[in-house]
Amino acid sequence: MTPGKPASLIARPLMFWTGVGLTCAGVGQHVWMFVDSASMEFHMAMMGMSGVMWAAMAAIVLGVLISGRAVVQPSGAGGAPDPAPDSSSRAGRRRLIGVLSFALLVDQMKPATLAFIQPGMRAEFHLGAEEIAWLPTVALTGTVVGSLVGGRAADRIGRRATILIASLLFLGTTVCGAMPTFGGILVMCALMGMAAGGMLPVVYALMTESLPPGRRAAIMVLQAGLTTTGGYMAAAGLAAVLIPMTGWRVLWFAQLPLVLILIALNRWIPESAAFTAQRSRRVRVPASTLFSRAHRTSTLVVSGYALSWGLVYWGFITFLPSQLAAASGGGMSAATLLFLSSLLSIPTCVVAAWLYMRWSARGTMVVYAALTVAALLLLAAVGMDGSRPVLLAAVILLFAGTAGVIALIGPYTAEVYPLAIRGTAGGWAAAVGKSGGAFGPPLIALVLSAPGSTRTAALLVALPMAVAGGAIALRGSTPSAGGPSDAATVRLSAELDDLVRGESVRAAEEDGTAAP
């Protein structure tokens, strides 16, 4: 293997790039159709699916399948491929942090865009509040499925292969912006959601296994918080600039260059050395281990924390742009206000990383849950028609709290579970969090149809967040202790650590070997 070129980790490179080329050809045809609709003010509703569009869709599906098959290691290859030789060096680790951070940024932009396309989509397709609520519901249901499948795939076919497959799905589903029917948009958004859900937990697992102990926790928390906030900021910024010029559809196509860059950077995403050792021994732990006696409490606590965040972020914040726009009275636009709020919440991610590493993981999670609850109570008190400065302060506080909560969930989950089920556990936590978006939007839409709607909705989502914070305080695990684990998992993790310890410094982690 040539030093510094982990691109050879693709099992069948020619097959992979052939599939990517087919996918790009299909996506390019949809981009051209969107550009060609400029004479209709980019309104493509009910244009119908032409034969060319169907052929382009077929090319996308075929291309994704071909490339996806190419990245999976052949069953007779005798285990996962070796990690990149420079992946354990300081430069290699920095490069990995940069590439995976970019991957998370792209990942977070996808679902965040849903909040900004709804007004334009409602107008073009003449949809009511109940109908448009299907968009986040379907998309986030897709993320639930993607998180479960992606997390389990990470423990079966590898962290790197799963990340690449999610990237390929991102590429193919950018055509959501050219769908002429609302039903077609729902299908594309469901697939896009599966890609987003499959990416998130795998990145945290790979980060945990690729960075040495010490500052790893702080790096992961900071990475999670900044990419979540950055993804929302990027979506809000693009919405503020592009929607007035070309309408809501362009937001999907504007992300196409980012996805292509991510795929091009795949050469700098190595496989986890710890996973490589585990795969070579063909030892598998069932997903049901998450609910074994040793892990049950941790799983329930993490699930509650993730679910409460999902209700706030996907259920409540998804409707903030439309609620703020309706109450603005000609002042600062909703997209601009949300962009500034997310920008000002960045320092809280830095504070979260510092507190997580220097003070207490559980304590930090409780603090940010309390901050989110406080913001929701303030919004319940002032409402959307309250004082503009107070409203802005409440929105900033809400973004600060939720940014901290999501920044902590992924790294915390990755650290409290052992290597053998780390991807599965991360996928479960992500799925539970996204499930709040699956049933949260219809619930909030129903609440918003009543008088005093925003205040009631804020109180409704504040309650589970308060309960989750209390559960973390009382029953949460301590990451530094490796988390609870049963005897079989302890032995498995110990064996894997012994195999990998001499291979690179990143495998010197405990991986759940220390019993509580």
Image: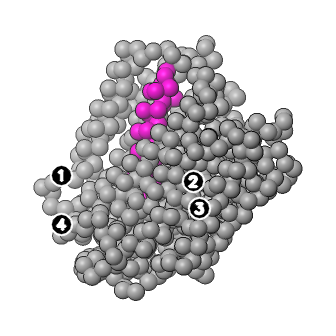
Query: Residue 440's mark?
Result: none
Position of the N terminus by quadrant = bottom left
Is residue 157 placed above or below 52 in the rendered structure? below
Front position in the image: 74 or 195: 195
- Residue 112 location in percent, x, y? 58, 45
Query: Residue 311's mark?
Result: 2
Q: Is residue 272 magenta?
A: no
Please identify, in this view, whether the residue under mark 1 or under mark 4 is nearer the observer.
4
Residue contact between numbered discs 3 and 1, judged by CB atoms under 8 Å: no
Q: Is residue 62 visible to the viewer in this orientation of the structure?
A: yes
Outermost residue on the front side: it is 450
Q: Which residue is mark 3?
A: 464
Q: Which circle's residue, 1 or 4, is located before the other in the chain?
A: 1
Residue contact between numbered discs 1 and 2, judged by CB atoms under 8 Å: no
Front position in the image: 99 or 483: 483
Q: Which residue is mark 1?
A: 74
Query: Residue 282's mark?
Result: 4
Q: Is residue 192 magenta?
A: yes
